[in-house]
Image (spheres, rainbow, N blue to C red):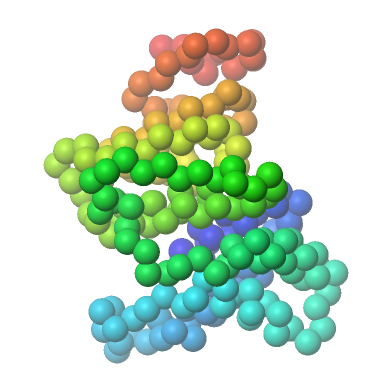
Amino acid sequence: MAGALRDIFVAIFPELGDIQGERIRKSIKESFIEAGWDDPNTSIEKLHEPEFKRFVEILRTDPKPDKGLRTLLLRLDELQDYGFFELGETRESLWESKQPIVIRIHATQNANLQKAFASLVFYGLYKDMFRRGTQNRITHAVVFDEAHRAAGLKLIPTMAKECRKYGISLVLASQEAKDFNISLFSAIANYLVLRLTELMRKPWYAT
């Protein structure tokens, strides 16, 4: 979980380096340790996830932040100003809904915030998919429009490979195929190309 969340923030802010990404991972891990997740004697039913903002608070406790940490905190401050870390933790899993759900992320024109919310929602779907377990049929479809905006998210090719056995059909709609890792295309069962102007990418679609 800590590694997946680290990847989300690195995808949102590509200028962050490996050291800053590792600081995110360690602070998220520490927040779970505080909540008792490292205690082998604690029943899983009694465990609860720490507040999402807790890892940011842990990062702020460094008494002498270096330049890298200060830059990281500035990026996180940008998200915090929009209430990104105040998201409710008790929401119902989207997989429990039997009605279509549209999640709009364009209420703000802030590109980083749009990527942050889209990535976090996608991460929540991915995490809850495993909690729900395998299914014997397709029960839901996820349509990710403008998916190239989150092309750097490592969860996309991973979910594309895993989702079918969990009853999920993943539909990625994008204008820019070149931004995706080529491993994604090996996991696609069907694709529809309406127009392709990127000559270098045409071999990717060969069957």
Answer whether residue 154 is visible to the viewer in this image.
no
Residue at far front of view: 107
Q: Residue at x 74, y 83 (%)?
A: 62
- The answer to whether residue 3 is left or right of residue 102 is right
* Residue at the (76%, 51%) spot, across then down: 15
Quadrant, the C terminus? top left
Residue, x 60% and y 37% (percent of image)? Answer: 149
What percent of the width, then of the height, locates residue 158? 43, 44
Foreground: 14 or 141? Answer: 141
Furthest-left residue in this view? 136
Q: Position of residue 19 (x, y in %)?
A: 71, 64
Q: Is residue 199 above or below residue 104?
A: above
What x and y, as percent, mark residue 79?
A: 66, 61
In the displayed structure, 135 sits above or below 198; it is below
Residue 102 located left or right of residue 197: left
Pick the residue in front: 72 or 110.
Answer: 110
Figure quadrant of residue 59: bottom right
Whether residue 143 can be seen here: yes
Most distant residue in the right direction = 67
Residue 43 sits above or below residue 117 on the image: below
Total numbered circles? 0
Determine the residue positioned at 52% across, 18% down: 204
Residue 111 pos. (x, y %): 68, 45
Q: Is residue 4 left or right of residue 46?
A: right
Does residue 205 lie above or below 142 as drawn? above
